[in-house]
Image: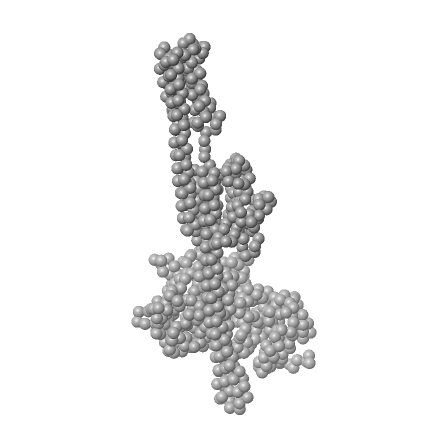
């Protein structure tokens, strides 16, 4: 059975029928085969009382048949061997070389000529066929390579595919050295060939000199590694090294060409992925720049306003009018509540963005969470009548109490900020038995959320066009982040009859039985 | 300096922020307390040893000693009530401090009114430490000897476990009880993580004792920390 490692799914290399390194029968085996066939025919002829010329024809047929399987020289051998065997064993007197008459001499000459010609023709045909097949394999390999590289979504994925393809195609192990931000070459993690010190030095030299090195084309078969530079528009991106051959090989000119095309394809891919990385990085920078500016603008506004209130109130507190002092104190309280909320939201958002937020899931009673959240929101919700509807049989839910409390508090603040005073807010909770999940909704009878803002409502710094001052646009982004951290989700919809309705979902889980005593 | 006027309780404020100390002194002296200050944990322990304050306000983020460490050393010889001051995001330290023997906590920023209410409750409790046979608060009357609970004069039927839980709250009324304190007391030390036992029993208890179980007045939730029985809800 196959087993998959879920974390690491390398792209499977496309099927390449066989390697390009041709597999001819070993030469000694060809001679053996030829000798066996001729000997067998001679043996049969020895016991068969037929005219010896008949066997001349049978030998000819056998030699032509053999030429389909073996090379030119074994065929020459077969021809000579069969002539000698025929003369020695078949042509009477047997077991001696006989003087041939003219007729037999002509027959022998024709036989010789025909056999050699047949051998020559078939071996030429076979060589042609082999070249065709190799050409086709090369084309297929290149096709697979370019398709795989196009499909690859990352640099690493593409390189891994290309190297595995090279491994199969050239029957070797391969390694890719790439120059990164530093000019030094670094071995790519997908390499299957571990480079020796000599290999590294040679690759380094190839990288510097930009001339292919290792050994000249069509040299004697050897085990030495082959280094091919990756060029792109005049500069060298790295070096592709093939090595770890199982037996000495020499690459034909076509194979070298293929290898260089391979290298060129990989260069293209590397360059393309690098450009993409650069442009993505720049896009990110631009985006983060934009966010930074938005953050700075809104944070400085949100922090400076209550600070200005506090300062003015403090300066005026020396007034003798006690009723004025009362109202100043109320202003100070409102300003600090706002400041506390802004700082809390900023802290929560940075907790989310630092990525270190791990929800501590435990059993929570949603009624407790709602009570705690209402207490957190405090006076801000005072002008809004609240109704709570929680089904009697609502079970405990798995949540992080503090996170869920903050989520509900943010939704309540959101409702308080974006609806006129007096607008009713309703909270409900329970279990959706069909979808098997826990839900909690916070709904108001305010103006509702414009449809075009619904998808973006949970993005940070997104604020409604007509939103009243007093928000950073972080509240809902925190709601979204905290719900996700708890394995839940949040949705917003319009209420029938007007108003926004936020629905929180959490997985529905059941705890073990709680004893009555 | 050390002569405390009789009748005026002495408080020790251990906080490294001078502005916080100044404002606390302002609030507390106005409310009729005598205030002593310490800016480090070591200094605080020395002050506490010399002056035996009636209650201690301890900031958890001290520069020299961790607040929990100060608490542990203090608890070696003093049982004075300790009110822990923490900032948002220090939930774990807060719970650790409560488990280590702190009596209550406040999260900065807090209001003066809230602080004074907590202090009053803390100081009142030292006086009522001797268990009376009957505890009375709000509409409740708890007969500790014959294990009966009456609400508005009517007998409320509680199971043995429910009574044990309520009894725990009554003996520690107005004090925060952490989840692990309650679980350890009622279900034993091996059940400290069985939060759902506690949640379910609180639900049952509230249904029997509260007028509106979904918005309880007496059996209040302390987010992430635990529960508290409030005897005089505002």
Q: Residue at x 35, y 71 (%)?
A: A450
Q: Residue at x 63, y 69 (%)?
A: B63
| Residue B40 spot, x, y in % from top left | 65, 71
Identify the coloring. Answer: one colour
Q: Residue at x 48, y 54 (%)?
A: A233
Count numbered badges in the picture: 0
Of A440 and B4, nearer the camera is A440
| Residue A297 spot, x, y in % from top left | 48, 74
Outermost residue, front side: A102
Of A100 and A354, nearer the camera is A100
| Residue A9 spot, x, y in % from top left | 45, 48
Of B90 and A305, nearer the camera is A305
Rendered position, A225 above or below B175? above
Outermost residue, bottom side: A320
Inspect this view and state whether residue B233 appears: no
Rendered position, A76 above or below B183? above
Quarter of the N terminus of chain B within the rendering = bottom right
Outermost residue, left side: A497
| Residue A125 spot, x, y in % from top left | 38, 31
Q: Residue at x 49, y 69 (%)?
A: A292
Q: From the viewer's perspective, is A388 left or right of B191?
A: left
Inspect this view and state whether residue B109 appears: yes
């Amino acid at each position: 059975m196959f087993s998959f490692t879920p974390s690491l799914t390398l792209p499977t290399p496309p099927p390449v029928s066989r390697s390009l390194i041709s597999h001819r029968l070993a030469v000694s085996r060809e001679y053996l085969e030829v000798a066996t066939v001729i000997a067998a025919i001679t043996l049969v002829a020895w016991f068969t009382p037929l005219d010896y010329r008949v066997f001349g024809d049978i030998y000819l047929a056998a030699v032509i048949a053999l030429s389909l399987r073996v090379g030119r020289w074994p065929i020459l051998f077969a021809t000579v061997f069969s002539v000698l065997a025929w003369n020695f064993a078949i042509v009477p007197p047997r077991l001696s070389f006989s003087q041939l008459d003219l007729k037999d001499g002509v027959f022998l000459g024709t036989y010789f000529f025909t056999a050699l010609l047949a051998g020559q023709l078939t071996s030429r045909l076979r060589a042609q066929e082999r070249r065709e097949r190799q050409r086709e394999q090369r084309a297929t390999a290149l096709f697979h390579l370019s398709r795989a590289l196009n499909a690859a979504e990352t640099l690493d994925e593409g390189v891994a595919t290309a190297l595995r393809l090279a491994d199969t195609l050239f029957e070797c192990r391969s390694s890719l050295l790439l120059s990164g931000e530093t000019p030094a070459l670094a071995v790519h993690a997908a390499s299957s060939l571990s480079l020796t010190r000599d290999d590294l030095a040679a690759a380094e030299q190839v990288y510097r000199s930009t001339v292919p090195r290792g050994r000249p084309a069509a040299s004697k078969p050897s085990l030495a590694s082959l280094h091919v530079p990756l060029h792109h528009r005049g500069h060298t991106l790295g070096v592709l090294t093939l090595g770890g051959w199982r037996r000495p090989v020499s690459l034909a000119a076509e194979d070298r060409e293929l290898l260089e095309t391979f290298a060129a394809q990989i260069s293209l891919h590397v360059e393309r992925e690098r450009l993409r990385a650069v442009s993505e990085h720049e896009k990110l920078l631009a985006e983060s720049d934009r966010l930074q500016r938005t953050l700075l603008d809104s944070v400085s506004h949100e922090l400076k306003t209550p600070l200005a209130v506090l300062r003015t109130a403090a300066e005026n507190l020396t007034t003798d009018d006690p009723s004025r002092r009362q109202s100043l104190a109320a202003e100070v309280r409102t300003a600090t509540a706002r400041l506390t909320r802004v700082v809390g939201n900023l802290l929560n958002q940075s907790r989310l963005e630092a990525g270190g937020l791990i929800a501590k899931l435990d059993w929570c009673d949603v009624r407790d969470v709602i009570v705690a959240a209402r207490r957190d929101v405090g006076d801000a919700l005072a002008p809004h009548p609240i109704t709570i509807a929680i089904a009697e049989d609502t079970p405990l839910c798995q949540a992080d109490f503090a996170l869920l409390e903050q989520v509900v508090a943010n939704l309540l603040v959101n409702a308080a900020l974006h609806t006129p005073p007096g607008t009713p807010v309703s909270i409900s909770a329970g279990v959706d038995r069909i979808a098997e999940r826990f839900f909690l909704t916070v709904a108001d009878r305010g103006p509702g959320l414009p449809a075009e803002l619904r998808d973006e409502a949970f993005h940070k710094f997104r604020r409604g066009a007509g939103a009243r001052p007093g928000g950073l646009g972080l509240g809902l982004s925190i709601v979204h982040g905290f719900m996700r951290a708890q394995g839940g989700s949040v949705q917003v919809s319009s209420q029938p009859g007007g108003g926004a309705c936020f629905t929180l979902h959490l997985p529905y889980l059941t705890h073990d039985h709680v004893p009555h005593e | 300096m050390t002569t405390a006027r009789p009748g005026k309780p002495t408080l020790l404020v251990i906080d490294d922020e001078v502005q916080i100390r100044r404002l606390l002194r302002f609030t507390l002296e106005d409310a009729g307390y005598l205030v002593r200050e310490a800016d480090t944990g070591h200094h605080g322990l020395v002050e506490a040893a010399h002056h035996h304050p009636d209650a201690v306000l301890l900031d958890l983020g001290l520069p020299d000693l961790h607040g929990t460490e100060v608490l542990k050393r203090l608890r070696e010889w003093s049982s004075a009530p300790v009110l822990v001051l923490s900032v948002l995001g220090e939930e774990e330290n807060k719970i650790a401090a409560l488990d280590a023997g702190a009596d209550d906590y406040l999260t900065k920023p807090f209001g003066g009114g809230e602080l004074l209410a907590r202090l009053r409750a803390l100081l009142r409790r030292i006086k009522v430490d001797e268990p009376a046979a009957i505890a009375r608060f709000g509409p409740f009357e708890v007969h500790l000897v014959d294990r009966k609970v009456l609400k508005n004069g009517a007998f409320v039927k509680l199971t043995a476990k429910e009574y044990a839980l309520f009894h725990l709250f009554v003996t520690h009324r107005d004090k925060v009880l952490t989840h692990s304190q309650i679980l350890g007391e009622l279900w034993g030390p091996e059940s400290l993580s069985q939060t759902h036992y506690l949640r379910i029993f609180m639900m049952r208890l509230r249904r029997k004792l509260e007028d509106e179980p979904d918005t309880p007045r007496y059996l209040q939730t302390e987010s992430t920390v635990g529960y508290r029985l409030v005897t005089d809800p505002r």
